[in-house]
Amino acid sequence: MQLTNRRQLLAGIGATFLAMPGRARAERPAPFLPELARWQTGNAVLSPPTFDAGRLFFCGSDTGGQVDPAAQVPVWLRPHGLSGPAAFRPRLAEGAMLIGGRQGYVCFDPDTGTERWRYTARIQTGVPVLAAGRAVFGDGHEIVALDLATGAELWRFAGVPDTIAAYAPAVAGDAVFAGPGDGRLYALSLADGALRWQIDGRARWQYLRQIHFGAGVLVAGSYKEQLFAISPENGTIRWEFIAGNFINSHHVAGDLACLWSPTGRIFAIDIGNGLPRWQYQTTDYRAGGDDWASVLAELTSAEGQLFTLDMRDTLRLLDLADGSLGVVGKVPGATRHAVLPLGAGRVAFPMMDGSLLMTGLG
């Protein structure tokens, strides 16, 4: 199904309004989330952390490290030595921890912090993805694959010069899907980087901001205001959803694609047909309302709940099944606007002072 303008958007979702939570109801003043632990990371600026196998991994302007949530100090902490900040959240796979930013990457042993290898950007490195023993990422207009164990280059695919592949590729099966900032979408062989197909969507989406794989399709957000479902077999667009304004980011959870639109709604879109399964109004932009602040932190989910963090450092959980509001709590301090569920009623936040905070859900 294709929804191509705001009028069609309203028509497409109108039939399901009665089944959806509508206007955000008035909220009582949010209590502060209880602080459980706080770790100093040695970073002036801390990037979003990662949770893997019961451990927290962090990086930032100066260091990378690992935290055991049950310990009072980091298990290890190392200066990363990059020429710029490690701006992307740590990626972990197959006994490797990759951190980096626009200037390149460093790979650590996640257990000990021992450095394994480095990659220096030729032009500008983008967000990486790890899969099948490979690190795949953009460097300028090229898509590059390195051996995750050694850092050795496996292949390099050249797109259009003078473009920047800044966003992470997606991997599904034996294929890599990359939108390198020039409006094109490439499907490449994960094994050797050979081109399988490409589509030129410059007239339609300008370029794709994020690509995720879920429920058998590529779910891609555009620089404009569309969310697309794209066939991984041949690049056919299966549906298009108009969010009414730019899409900051989207989160795929099972057969749902969740996003916040600056029009003032969180949408949970059925990946199968492109229609909202539910929506939650966060903002009506009228004076005196109980509006949320803007939601610029990436949405994430755990244990059936969608975690949303707004710019006033308020965390809210919405039920993924129906969008009903659950926990509402204030973070005790100023966050870097990222949220990481840890399970068992715990959540972590990178803080503006460079510390890593763990709270309960209250």
Image (cartoon, rainbow, N blue to C red):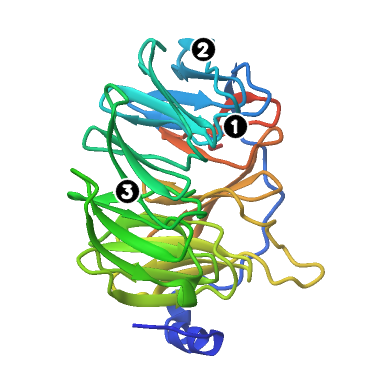
Amino acid identity at mark 1 = Pro
Which residue is found at the position 71% from the left and 33% from the top? 333
- Tell me the mark number nearer the camera, choosing from 3 and 2: 3
Which residue is found at the position 58% from the left and 27% from the top? 60
* Mark 2 residue crowding within 10 angstroms, few (<14) / some (14–19) / many (20+): some
* Mark 1 residue crowding within 10 angstroms, few (<14) / some (14–19) / many (20+): many
Q: Quadrant of residue 118?
A: top left
Q: Which residue is mark 3?
A: 157
Q: Nearer the viewer, residue 50 or 268?
A: 50
Q: Is 243 placed left or right of 353 in the picture?
A: left
Tell me residue 53's x, y (percent).
32, 26
Tell me residue 362's x, y (percent).
56, 37
Disc 2 to disc 1: CB gap under 8 Å: no
Q: Which residue is mark 1?
A: 350
Q: Secondary structure at mark 2?
A: strand
Q: Nearer the viewer, residue 121 or 206?
A: 121
> Distance of mark 1 from mark 3, alpha carbons?
35 Å
The circle on residue 78 is 2
| First of labels 3, 2 by sequence position | 2
Amino acid identity at mark 3 = Phe
Q: Quadrant of residue 358?
A: top right
- Tell me the mark number nearer the camera, choosing from 1 and 3: 3
